[in-house]
Image: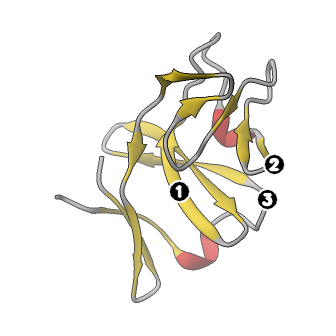
Amino acid sequence: MTYTKIAVQADLPAPGEAKEFEVAGKTICVANVNGTFTAIDNVCLHMGGPLGQGYIENGKVVCPWHGWEYDPATGSLEGDPKTRIDVYPIKIENGDVLVDV
C-alpha cells in the first residue's frame, strides 16, 4: 500500500459531516461517522454529485444533490448493495491523515 498525506487531523470533518480532499489528481470524500473516519470516491453514481459536500445520516453518506445514500465502510448504495463506489484505506499517524488511493 502507498499512503499519501491529504491533510492534518485538524482538517478532518466533524462528527456527522463529510468533506472533500484532493489526492493523486482526484477528489475523495472523507466522512466522520461517530468519530470513525472513512475515505470513499467523491462522485455519486446517480448524476455525479459531490459526496464530500453531503452529510451523514443514520451512518450513511448522503449525496447533497438527490439524496442517494452510501455506506462509508463498504461503498455500497443503500437499497442496492451490489452497486458500490470505491473505498480507500485511511489512517492517522502523528497528526497526519494518510489515504491509499
Q: Which residue is mark 3?
A: 16
Q: Position of residue 31 (x, y in %)?
A: 63, 54
Residue at 49 percent across and 51 percent down: it is: 39
Question: What secondary structure is marked by label 1?
Answer: strand
Q: Nearer the viewer, residue 40 or 70?
A: 70
> What amino acid does circle 2 point to?
Asn
Q: Judge left or right: residue 76 versus residue 33.
A: left
Observer-side mark, 3 or 2, equals 2
Q: Residue at x 63, y 12 (%)?
A: 46
What's the CA distance linking mark 3 and mark 2? 9 Å
How packed mark 3 is, by other alpha carbons closer than 10 Å (few <14, some 14-19, many 20 or more), is some
Dot placed on the residue nearer the N-terminal end, 1 or 2? 1
Q: Earlier in the sequence, mark 1 or mark 3?
A: 3
Q: Which colour scheme appears in the figure?
A: secondary structure
Q: CA distance from mark 1 to mark 3?
A: 12 Å
The correct choice, above or below, for 47 with respect to 87 in the image is above
The location of residue 32, given as percent across then percent down, is 67, 61
- Give above or below for 15 relative to 10: above
Which residue is most to the bottom? 94
Q: Amino acid at mark 1?
A: Thr
Q: Nearer the viewer, residue 2 or 8?
A: 2
Task: Look at the numbered discs 1 and 2 and tell me whether their residues touch, using CB distance below 8 Å.
Answer: no
Q: Left or right: where does residue 51 sit relative to residue 25?
A: right
Specify the farthest residue to the top: 47
Q: Position of residue 67 (x, y in %)?
A: 81, 24
Q: Amino acid at mark 3?
A: Gly
Q: Which residue is mark 1?
A: 38
User: Can you tell which quarter of the image residue 87 is in?
Assistant: top left
| Residue denoted by label 2 | 58
Q: Are marks 1 and 3 in contact (CB under 8 Å)?
A: no
Q: Secondary structure at mark 2?
A: loop
